[in-house]
Amino acid sequence: MKNTAFILFLFIFFMGCDSKPKIIQVSKDAFQNGQYNTATMGLLSRAKISASDKAKNVIFLIGDGMGLTQVSAAAIKNDNELFLMKFPIIGIHNCQPSEGLITDSAAGATAFATGKKTFNGAIGLGADSSSHQTILERCEELGMATGMVATSTIVHATPASFISHRPSRKQYEDIAADFMNTEIDYFVGGGKKYFDRRSQDERNLVKEMQDKGYVVNDYFQEDFQNLSIDTKSNFAYFTADDDPIPQSKGRNYLMPASKTGIEFLDAHDDPNDDKGFFMMIEGSQIDWGGHANNAEYVISELLEFDKVIGEALRFAKEDGETLVLVTADHETGGMAINSGSTKDSLNITFSSGYHTATMIPVYAYGPGAELFSGVYENTAIYDKLLLAMGITASK
């Protein structure tokens, strides 16, 4: 009888330990921009990884507007050292929308999120305006932890395409309301005003999220780098009232929000079922630099984004069950490095203030990475991600 009581005590004790929330302390010192070093750059082996291995987790990084010239310019300015240059598997996708040759971010991200080509401006819809479940929604449906981080507003075209279904990417308040239709566990980005000071209705979506159990913070209350985050509760953080500022003007949350988000989702995943997580991280303002025909803007945003890629690779290398996928929705600006360029003085020109139809590189590391080699349509990324995770699309 005494043995039975002792065993029961141990069971209750360890169950109690498991129920304690894990707290992630975000430290500013941990995210200082350092130089690339040989030990970090040597994380990866170029040995092939079997596509038959199932990816429990996916970290999907989208460098908006990031074509090969943007990558080349950033590499040259960084002594030809980028984490992007360390991937063992590289492919190419065709980013054309359902109509015409040149996609916008909405149609491009919708192709990734739903596996469907659509018209420019559409969010989470097919070319016939029918709604299609996104990969993030599918992962939520299966009980996986999910998250998004963006250097734009969180209702901007790319993140919106993973969580909303609207005919126009400009329906920012409608897109914000669509966040209430899913249980996304973690998100960080700008656009707070679309949630709590709305023009089309009296809803306060921040309060509605808090009523659902979310911990919601913003830059008015506390800098992200000073937060302690309880992984037992869903978490949202607004980095700006509207669009966040560029990295060169002081924006500093992409790395800590991404690193913390990966740790959060890994801990948030229920250890009793261990279903994994899906996270989308967007370097949004690479695109904005292209639209502005500002090479320094493009390069500074891409170098920051590349450090986040390095953090994702570090996690995947240690974890062994995580697929890291990096691509862009399109190229922006028709950027070219011209004759007369040197390492210290790049002669860069732009042929456009908009997007171009050039095909886009895809970089993959981890279980299922080999699926992403070759040349294919942007919609195939959705199918390949599901295949890598060993799940099927919902009917």
Image (cartoon, rainbow, N blue to C red):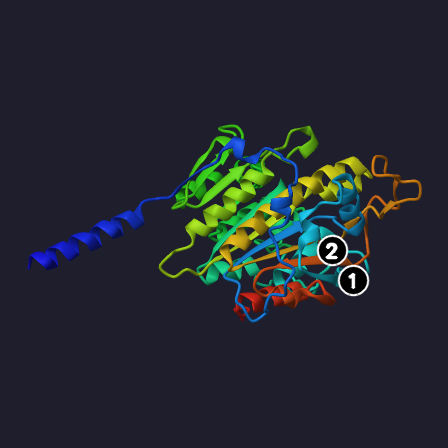
- In this rendering, position of residue 317 left or right of residue 326: left
Is any atom of residue 122 visible in this view? no
Give the amino acid at mark 1: Glu
Q: Position of residue 274 (x, y in %)?
A: 41, 60
Q: Position of residue 345 (x, y in %)?
A: 86, 35
In this orientation, which residue lies closer to the viewer: 120 or 228?
A: 228
User: What's the mark number on residue 230?
Assistant: none
Name the residue beneath numbered marker 2: 120
> Label 1: few (<14), some or many (≥20) within 10 Å?
few
Quarter of the figure with residue 98:
bottom right
Residue appearing at x 83%, y 35% in the figure: 344
In this orientation, which residue lies closer to the viewer: 304 or 113?
A: 304
- Above or below, comparing residue 59 to residue 247 in the picture: below
Q: Position of residue 3 (x, y in %)?
A: 10, 58
- Gap in angstroms between the C-alphas marked 2 and 1: 8 Å
Is any atom of residue 62 visible in this view? yes
Question: In the displayed image of the protein, which residue is found farthest to the right?
Answer: 339
- Above or below, comparing residue 384 to residue 293 in the picture: below
Question: In the displayed image of the protein, which residue is found farthest to the front?
Answer: 38
Give the amino acid at mark 2: Asn
Q: Position of residue 319 (x, y in %)?
A: 50, 55
Of label 2 and label 1, which has the lower sequence position? 1
- In this rendering, position of residue 221 left or right of residue 44: left
Name the residue beneath numbered marker 1: 99
Q: Are marks 2 and 1 in contact (CB under 8 Å)?
A: yes
SS state under label 2: loop
In this orientation, which residue lies closer to the viewer: 373 or 392?
A: 373
In this orientation, which residue lies closer to the viewer: 296 or 134?
A: 296
Quarter of the figure with residue 32:
top right
Tell me the quadrant of the picture where the C terminus can be found.
bottom right
- Marks counted in the figure total 2
